[in-house]
Image: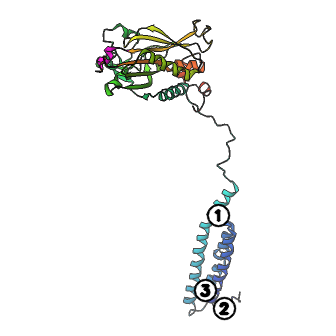
Amino acid sequence: MTDSLTQALPARAAALAADFDRELAAVEASRSGDRVEELRVAFLGRKGKVTALLEDLRNCSKEERPAAGRAINELKQHVEARVSALKEKAQEWELGARLNAEPLDISLPVTASVPRGSLHPVTLIRRELLNEFRRLGFTVYDGPEIDYDFYNFSALNMPSDHPARDMQDTFYVREQEHLLLRTHTSNIQIHCMLNERPPLRIVAPGRVFRVDSDPTHTPMFHQIEAFVVDRGITFAHMKGVIDAFMKAVFGSSMKTRLRPSFFPFVEPGAELDLQCVHCQGKGCRLCKHTGWLEVGGCGMIHPNVFEAVEYDSEVYSGFAFGFGIDRMAMLKYKLDDLRQLFEGSHSFLGHFPLFT
Ligand code: DAH
């Protein structure tokens, strides 16, 4: 640089601007926030080069002052604008440097043990049952959990004075309006048959409610209802379907047995037993030494039910069955207390798989 004392101030300002631009380029190349600050101090600080020029302005002649003042001010504004732009850039450099220093690789495997969720055993068995029913050509149907007496009882051949109503202790929501919590999924038969025409191949899982609570009964539990209505449907079709899906769920060596029984909405009616999963029919504590476990009821749909939904029972016949899903989950997963299913304990539920 030329000797500052002998040079006119505007020329010195121009020379300083050139110096600044050169240093600015070097600082920018360094991508260092510290060097931006050093540059600011060197030019704009109390003892900085621009500040020194401003002080020299006091010593210059009146004639020179306006031009010199303008030149130095322009220089100062130029330097200030560049430094503040560079300060902003410095923040980005710093962020980039930090990210490079602490690399975050989202493809790395997780090393800490993270607790995993799993599917509830009732969900698992319900999915498995539905898959099997779909394979057999059934359609999944849904129905209300809060329902009218008509769907839950009357239309299922249980008029209000029918003693069979006592078999299922009912929770009433509003008794005078005949509104209740359904006691079984058989109500879905009525909803479905009133809305659809045969042929029907329906499966309907759901929650049901009864006033009941002990080691083998909970006030809420799950059932799966299935029914088929068409011309020429027989008891043999029913046995074939039940056998096929029980084998699919419990393995091909599973044996089933039908025992004559009474349900108002079927005639003839039967109860379905599975060979004991624990002793394979030899007799043990679980099956009370009978070799068999009861899982639900079934039968040929009663003509009175067809009459309630205005199907011609001279033309159509059908079978229906309803099984306890919780009971099947207990048998499949070898659980000994039904209540375990509804307590929500993590240590219990964690034993089941995440996927089916
Ligand atoms: N709904 C009966 C119950 O919960 C079970 C049942 C029996 C369903 C016979 C049916 C059936 O569809 O045909 O006890």
Q: Which mark is residue 93?
A: 1
Name the side, left or right, on which 219 lies relative to 72: left
Label 3, on which residue? Answer: 57
- SS label for mark 2: loop
Three-letter amino acid code at the position of disc 3 = Leu
**Mark sitting on residue 43:** none
Categorize mark 3 by other alpha carbons within 10 Å: few (<14), some (14-19), many (20+): some
| Closer to the eye: label 3 or 1 | 1
- Place residue 150 in its image quadrant: top left
Q: Using the image as rendered, state which of residue 183 and residue 5 is in the foreground.
A: 183
Q: Quadrant of ligand 1?
A: top left
Quadrant containing the C terminus in the rendered view: top right
Q: Position of residue 311 (x, y in %)?
A: 30, 21
Residue 180 in view (yes/no) = yes
Which stretch is magenta?
A: 301-308
**Picture quadrant of residue 156:** top left
**Picture coordinates of residue 67, whole percent (x, y):** 56, 89
Residue position marked by numbered label 2 in the rendering: 7
First in sequence, mark 3 or 2: give its number: 2
Q: Estimate the spatial distance between the alpha carbons at disc 1 and disc 2, rounded to whole Å.
A: 39 Å
Q: Earlier in the sequence, mark 3 or mark 1?
A: 3
Q: Is residue 75 magenta?
A: no
Cβ–Cβ under 8 Å for marks 3 and 2: no
Q: Amino acid at mark 2?
A: Gln
User: Looking at the picture, how far across and down is residue 236, in whole percent?
Assistant: 45, 15
Decide whether the magenta segment is chiefly helix, strand or loop. Answer: helix
Label 1 CA crowd tier, 10 Å (few <14, some 14–19, many 20+): some
> Is label 3's Cβ within 8 Å of ligand 1?
no
